[in-house]
Amino acid sequence: MEETSTIILIGSSLLIASILTSVVALRFGTPLLLIFLGVGLAAGQDGIGGIWFNDAPGTFLIGSVALAVILFESGFDTRVQSYRTAAWPAFTLATFGVAITTGVIGVAAHVLLALPWIESLLIGAVVSSTDAAAVFLLLRVGGITIRDRVRSTLEIESGSNDPMAILLTILLVEAAQIGHFELARAALEFVWEMGGGVLGGVVGGVLLVTLINGAKLESGLNLVVSLAIALFVFAGTAALGGSGFLAVYVAGLVAGNVHLQGSQNLRRFHSGLTWLSQIVMFVMLGLLATPSGFKAIAVPAVALAFLLILVARPLAVWLCLLPFRFTANETTFVGWVGLRGAVSMLLALVPILGELPNGQIIFNTAFIVVIVSLLVQGWTIGPMARWLRLIVPPRTGPVERVELELPGDIGHELVAYTVHPKSAVARGQPLPRWARPSLVVRDERVVPLHKARPIRAGDRVYMFMAPNRLPLLDKLMGGTRPLDQSDREFYGDLVLSPDATVEQIAEMYGLPLALQNASRTLRALFHHEFPKGFELGDRVRMGGVELIVRDLDEEGEITSVGLDLEPPTPNQTRLPLLLRPGEIRERIETWWGRTAFRRWQGRQRRGRG
């Protein structure tokens, strides 16, 4: 009993310490996952806590369960619309990108650590996948809004690249044990794992939705059912040879994109579980590590980390995104946000569990790579996004809104808004007919509806509303903010109607006109240029200006177009190394033309002399 109480006391103390330190760390922009890892290191046998912990199998088991919970919540919060423009680039990164990264880091590890080729490639496989927990946390909780195509690519990639890394790790561990690598078997297992993961996830997601919507269980039991089915899908798919991690992510994606009874409560529940899972997983991995053993491989491991950040990941991203319509700045950002985290450290336990001679070296190397990744990349995501001009400027000010999901299948929510003093409603804008308040609280007193008009700043307005109407109400109830210079760089200097034709705009501003586009409206022009879908900020160049998608409605249709009179030139691309082939050719031709012109000028001067 005393030993049990001691273990519970230590565990709860570490949990409380992680939470309290994270509150302080947020003020300094410190990556939270690094804080959780630091708590584990500080409490471990080489830290001030002096806790001796060496249970690799137990850590792998608990870490796998925690990662399954995180991936389910990741899929549950991902909109299926994100796949319209980001699925293929993300899946390319999740497969070919992982393979390219494994190869580059494997070669470097062979040189720097003098390990056999299979074990060197094993290090590459272990650190090849981005971490879903780290990426989702930093993109969604980091306080920045990235363009949808870029954000969706990163989130989908981080949720789907684990199967490839896990497969390569297991196959390479087996190859190290038997002395050779079987390529045909690897290809067959990859197809089986990916196919089984997708199928298991779809079946599991449908099962979850059917059970919760059909059984009409008590709301508290719905939370338990969702967790139980998520873990069942993960373990069941893995037992049948498929990818359990991919399956649990797909199950969350299926359940999160259909009508699900009590979905708001489920989101809050799984959000809390995800936080708990991240803390437990990183603290345990920190406890398991022994920093005193890092000295022998610290220098080559740090070199591998920077090679991964600056060479291997950008190279893999550039090659994988070449067929897709990403700008150089977007490619640069995707290449930078390749955070390594718990997945890499969990996979680094596999060589130890497989009793490879250099298993501890592989684990220590992966641990250092993860720390460097969180320090360098995790701390700089916001500044990097701003430097690359990928931040989407907010069009409205702060919105104070509370939602309460109603029981049954009525498809409405009870929404409470606090009217912002600088909102359109506070300035006299009437509410739409479909937005009739059910209750108005003013100065802590309920005001009869016939006396509550007009709505005033500070009023608490309650209304029953369909979820798809909330974005418009946010604009009416939230604060407004004027566009500054950086906003105009994103949205354009002028506002145009999407129903205007290209010919009209060309005549009005003296722009060159392509005859095949003359009769098209601006809306039709964007549909033609972006047949797979567009988003806010997408641009089409016309001579020396650019047309910009400025506003979209709930269905994703353009409602206004911006006109940028002084768009950035190709020479303003932040990192010329990650240009598309066409852009590289244009730059070479421009450079060659300038060089030839200077040579001609030199010959002319010499001739006159």
Image (spheres, helix red, strand yellow):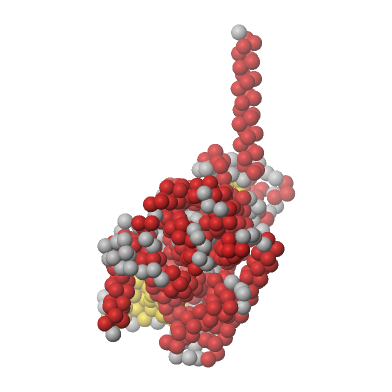
Q: In the figure, residue 368 lies in which quadrant?
A: bottom left
- x then y, percent, for residue 171: 60, 64
Tell me what residue is drawn at x 68 percent, y 61 percent: 183
Q: Residue furthest top?
A: 609
**Does residue 225 appear in this view?**
yes
Q: Is 144 on the left or on the right of 606, as rendered?
A: left
Of residues 115 and 464, which is closer to you in this image?
115
| Quadrant of the rendering where the C terminus is positioned | top right
Residue 74: x %, y % from top left:
49, 70
Front-most of 108 and 91? 108
Going 65% across and 39% down the picture, which residue do you hit? 585
Q: Quadrant of residue 525?
A: bottom right
Residue 383's place in the image compared with 413, above or below, is above
Picture coordinates of residue 280 (x, y %)?
A: 38, 71
Q: Which one is in front, 355 or 241?
A: 355
Residue 222 x, y percent position in the rendering: 47, 86
| Residue lying at 58% horizontally and 63% vertically, measured from the top left | 177
Q: How many marks?
A: 0
Q: Quadrant of the N terminus?
A: bottom left
Nearest the viewer among 51 and 482 is 51
**Could you tell me which residue is drawn at 63 percent across and 21 percent down?**
599
Q: Residue furthest right?
A: 516
The answer, for residue 511, to whether it is visible in the render is no
